[in-house]
Image (cartoon, coloured by chain):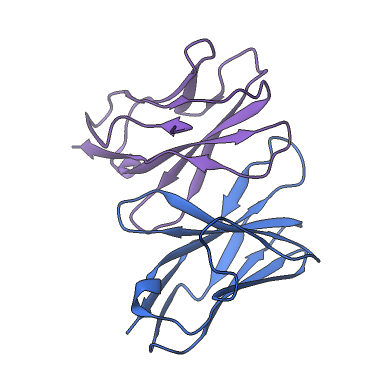
């Protein structure tokens, strides 16, 4: 149980285009999902907290208009990187929080974005 | 100030031996949770073990155990009988509050298991 999928796993796009990344909880409902960014050999940086049916909460320094988050259902959150630039190239990971217990987060396999 | 500190950027261990990965934390909240995650080179984050601040006993999950020393604010991960597949990055993380949603991660420790 507690499987989170992420799609695509790898994407290459040109500067100026937009890219959408999907995060799905496959066997549980997640009212809260999280989006992280990770640079090589570094820790995870929380970008935003996504709540089903409401606006996402962004961390300080994260541009809301650049990283659009939508949490349309209890099993799906999407991150859209708009007008991508090479500096947006990174590993993006989503996670979903279980509704009870220790509230551990289960992570998707990540999406490697390369902007050329 | 760092909320989660992992002081070992890299660790090496021989196959079949035990290894301890260090983690110290800082919080003033009496209710918190501590987590360990494993990240292999493929990038996925794998949940390993959890310790709640009010738990009386140290958490164990198979070959993983958490050495929780509350007064010292440390939550070290012990991996027994290391296997080659244990080679990965290991992250300690903390959730503050009884049901707080955010996780704060440490910088990670790269573990290499030698045959």
Indicate the position of residue B70 as horizontal and vertical percent values. 54, 14
Relative depth, front residue between B17 and A45? A45
- Position of residue B109 in the picture relative to residue A28 (left or right): left
Relative depth, front residue between B54 and A6? B54
Report which colour depicts chain B. Answer: purple
Chain in blue (letter): A
Q: Is residue A68 above or below residue A3?
A: below
Residue in view at x 70 percent, y 69 percent? A76
Whether residue A33 is visible, yes or no, is yes
Q: Is residue B3 above or below residue A24?
A: above
- Position of residue B91 in the picture relative to residue B58 (left or right): left
Residue in view at x 36 percent, y 77 percent? A114
Instruction: Point out the residue furthest to the left here.
Output: B115
Indicate the position of residue B36 as horizontal and vertical percent values. 49, 36
Indicate the position of residue B14 as horizontal and vertical percent values. 21, 30
Whether residue A28 is visible, yes or no, is no
Q: Is residue A15 above or below residue A4?
A: below
Residue in view at x 77 percent, y 63 percent? A52
Count every numbered label the image shows and give the total. 0
- Position of residue B15 in the picture relative to residue A51 (left or right): left
């Amino acid at each position: 149980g507690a499987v989170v999928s992420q799609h695509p796993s790898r994407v290459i796009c040109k500067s100026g285009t937009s890219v959408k990344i999907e995060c799905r909880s496959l066997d549980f409902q997640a009212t809260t999902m999280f989006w992280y960014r990770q640079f090589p050999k570094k820790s995870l940086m929380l970008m935003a907290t996504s709540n089903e049916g409401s606006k996402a909460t962004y961390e300080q320094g994260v541009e809301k208009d650049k990283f659009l988050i939508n949490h349309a259902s209890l099993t799906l959150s999407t991150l859209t990187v708009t007008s991508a630039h090479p500096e947006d190239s990174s590993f993006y990971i989503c996670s979903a929080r279980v509704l009870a217990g220790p509230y551990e987060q289960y992570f998707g396999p990540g999406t490697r974005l390369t902007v050329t | 100030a760092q909320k989660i500190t992992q002081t070992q950027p890299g660790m090496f261990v021989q196959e079949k031996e035990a290894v301890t990965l260090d983690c110290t934390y800082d919080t003033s909240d009496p209710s918190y949770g501590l987590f360990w995650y494993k990240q292999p080179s493929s990038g996925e984050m794998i949940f390993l073990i959890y310790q709640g601040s009010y738990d009386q006993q140290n958490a164990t999950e198979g070959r993983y155990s958490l050495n929780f020393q509350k007064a010292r604010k440390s939550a070290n991960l012990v991996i027994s009988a290391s296997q080659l597949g244990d080679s990965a990055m290991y992250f300690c993380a903390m959730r503050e509050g009884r049901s707080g949603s955010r996780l704060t991660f440490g910088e990670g420790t790269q573990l290499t298991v030698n045959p």
